[in-house]
Amino acid sequence: MTRYIRRAAVFCGLLLFALLVNATRVQVLHADAYDENPANRRDTIARYRQPRGDILVDGRPVTGSRDTREHLRYERTYADGPLYAPVTGFASQEYGTTLLEHTEDGLLAGTDPLLQPLPLWNDFTRSRNAGGDVLTTIHPAAQRAAYEGLRSRKGAVAAVEPSTGRILALVSVPSYDPELLSGNGAAARQAWARLNADPDKPMLNRAARQTYPPGSTFKVVTAAAALDAGVVTDLDEPTDSPDPYTLPGTTTRLTNESRGCADASVREAFTWSCNTVFAKVGVATGLADLTATAEGFGFNEEGLRVPFPVARSTFDTTMDRAQLALSSIGQYNTRATPLQMAMVAAAVANNGHVREPYLVERTTRASGGTVSTAGPGRSRQAMYPSTALRMRELMRGVVEEGTGTNAAIRGAVVGGKTGTAQHGIGNSGTPYAWFVSWAQNDGDAEAKVAVAVVVEDAAASRREISGGGTAAPIAKAVMEAVLKP
């Protein structure tokens, strides 16, 4: 009898060992395959079993979670969804995540290993931490001023703090309500189809993901390159520039919208935005020096993230002299995001130094404990400090007596540059209206804000576009919001 009991015990032991081996095979060797199997919904159910962490602006959540009592229990909600959509993106049970909802997904969903009380704790307990929170750098008054300034016009605004690179505003119009996509039912699918079919592309983040010809705002880069290279030494010396100017090696004549541009000094040409002068100055500066300065500002940079990816702003490095002339006034193949042009204005205000922009100030656990903190990113020198000083003079002249007077703010020092960007086949499209600027209160040691505004559907009249009728008042409102005590 004892022998049979012993055999039964051994057999049971072998069965137990086989079960352990099989469990190990399933949970270790084939775990990834089961996790990635579309039929396995356990991770999806667990993901929506608890509220998602929040994205905050100035300490106030602009996101939330709604208990649906359904299988996928919690759906994402948004306060002022269209206002903050270019910052938050969306978190959808059906279509995934974008922008901050995507780059900070691990923390917001509670799966980030940094949220675990001990290393590998959740792997053993099969538990999930409460989602953490993301505190942004956005200035709520500046964000709203930009959004309301654009109103129903198509365009974008980006604003940064020059000394740190903190992004203060990131606005794109038309916008959309991310909450419409949060669920997984028919309403979400209908909203998705409608938004994707909209020719105005409301889900496109125009401030960071769309590039435009920068037009005359690029003259900031051209002037800085010419000053750094020593091609221009006296801002008030006549430039011997014909009007019209024949592009080198061609019979194409470049003209001006402004009068009095023939032989104008660089100061006069910058103040009144003379194309002929800056085309000629760009050619004299040369492709190598102009490329070096443009890349110092951030053009052609790969992989910029804030933390979500930013579209690459481009300056062609293989041009002939005629193409260089056009690129020097922000045309030909030159393209920039509004965020890039805000960085250009910020570099002028920050003594020639460009701070890498960032959007997340701090991340925290649900309990409030800090997970990570940000600070000023890497800095590079786009121009000599002496050049930046002279560029501030030029930009102040635009606002004080030139094409950007509508951006002037009482009690503040403001510098700016207007721009009109031609586009379309044969320049047939309605010109884009641009304005880039920086501002500081009287008596302050440094600028508090740099702004770039682009309006896609402005009036075609140059007076309306570059004279501040469209873009400059929006920039003014954003700067006032930041400067207000």
Image (cartoon, rainbow, N blue to C red):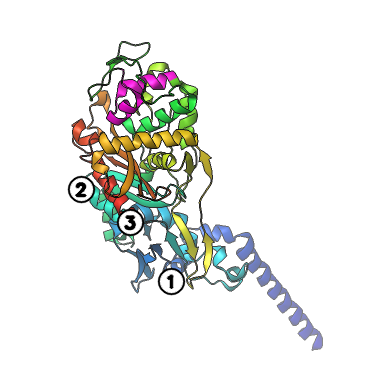
Secondary structure of the residue carrying tag 1 is: loop
Q: Quadrant of the C terminus?
A: bottom left
Circle 3 residues within 10 Å: few <14, some 14–19, many ≥20: many
The residue located at (33%, 43%) in the rendering is 414
Is residue 315 depicted above or below 108 in this figure? above
- Which one is earlier in the sequence, the residue at label 1 or at label 3? 1
- Please say whether residue 175 is visible from this viewpoint: no
- Marks 2/1 in contact by CB < 8 Å: the verdict is no
Q: Amino acid at mark 3?
A: Tyr
The residue located at (71%, 72%) in the rendering is 17
Q: Amino acid at mark 2?
A: Ser
Is residue 229 depicted above or below 453 in this figure? above
Q: Which residues are magenta?
A: 263-284
Q: Which residue is mark 3?
A: 84
The residue located at (30%, 62%) in the rendering is 185
Residue 373 % position (x, y): 52, 60
Q: Which residue is mark 1?
A: 50
Q: CA distance from mark 2 to mark 3?
A: 16 Å
- Please say whether residue 469 is visible from this viewpoint: yes
Residue 369 % position (x, y): 52, 70
Q: CA distance from mark 1 to mark 3?
A: 23 Å
Q: Which residue is mark 2?
A: 152
Residue 9 % position (x, y): 75, 81
Given the current orientation, which residue lies at the most extreme front position? 443
Q: Nearer the viewer, mark 2 or mark 1?
A: 2
Q: Quadrant of the N terminus?
A: bottom right
- Magenta span: chief secondary structure: helix
